[in-house]
Amino acid sequence: MSRRKKLIEVALPLEAINLESAREKSIRHGHPSTLHLWWARRPLAACRAVLWASLVDDPSSWPDRFPTEADQERERQRLLDILARIEVQKDKDGKTKQVVRGLVSWDDVNDPNSGVLDAAQREIARCLAWDRGEDPPTDPQAVREYIAKHAPPVYDPFAGGGSIPLEAQRLGLKAYASDLNPVAVLINKALIEIPPLFKDKPPINPQDRPHPPTPLSHRARLPSPPNPLSHRARGSLRFESVVWGARISGRCALLRTMDAG
């Protein structure tokens, strides 16, 4: 069977990818770059675009489904619009500005209501299914399960700041990373290894749990943890880390008290 040409080999919306990659430098709230300084961090937008376009087939690879050049160009443009497109918008002062939309957009990919990530994953699953002679899944959960089962894994031997394995995970791929620098290893562990372990888990602090935990016995009852964060930060990873630290500190203090007694 001949190798199918991928979208990245034919066309990429480079202008939109470059615009969003440059914009990332000014994003601070919630951006992985704020986790720890890394001097050669790759733009997430570019990594996301390269990974996705390397998995999605170019329409010319399917002449039976897109027989004419016009059909192929229309389908190619549809795929490129999913990946990245530039829209002109007006601000409140009436001034126009260019805004990047699509998979490379930091705002769109982090908005669960945009549907951008679901659309991108459907295209990956469709190419995988077509290549296997199967019907592509359409339900978002079925799409993610199909990708996890059939998509090739991504391995970055010199992962650095973790941009490539992070974006591979975002697309639903299995990601592996390594690096010679122990700082880079620590960054990748904190960025791509530890967070998935707590995905969809309820908060550990009783204020944010849907159902309060069973009360501990009077001997094991812990003091309420300090709350150095604002109410807006409740439920965040930072707040959970503070609560967890206070819980461990309280247990250690309890054990010392019991040992002394």
Image (cartoon, rainbow, N blue to C red):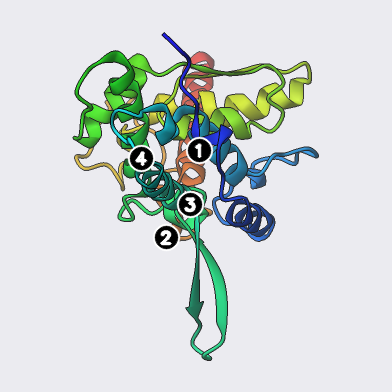
Q: Which residue is mark 1?
A: 241
Compared across the picture, whether 135 is left or right of 92 comes to left
- Name the disc covering residue 108, or none: none
Choose between 243 and 6: the one closer to the eye.
Answer: 6
- Name the disc covering residue 231, or none: 2
**Could you tell me how far apart the alpha carbons at marks 4 and 2 are, in whole angstroms?**
58 Å
Q: Position of residue 70 (x, y in %)?
A: 38, 47
Disc 3 marks a residue whose amino acid type is Asn
Choose between 31 and 236: the one closer to the eye.
Answer: 31
Q: Which residue is mark 4?
A: 68
Q: Position of residue 97 (x, y in %)?
A: 57, 76
Choose between 125 and 208: the one closer to the eye.
Answer: 125
Q: Is residue 202 above or below residue 234?
A: above
Q: Tell whether label 2 touches label 3 (CB within 8 Å).
A: no
Choose between 232 and 10: the one closer to the eye.
Answer: 10
Q: Which residue is mark 3?
A: 227
Compared across the picture, whether 152 is left or right of 150 comes to right
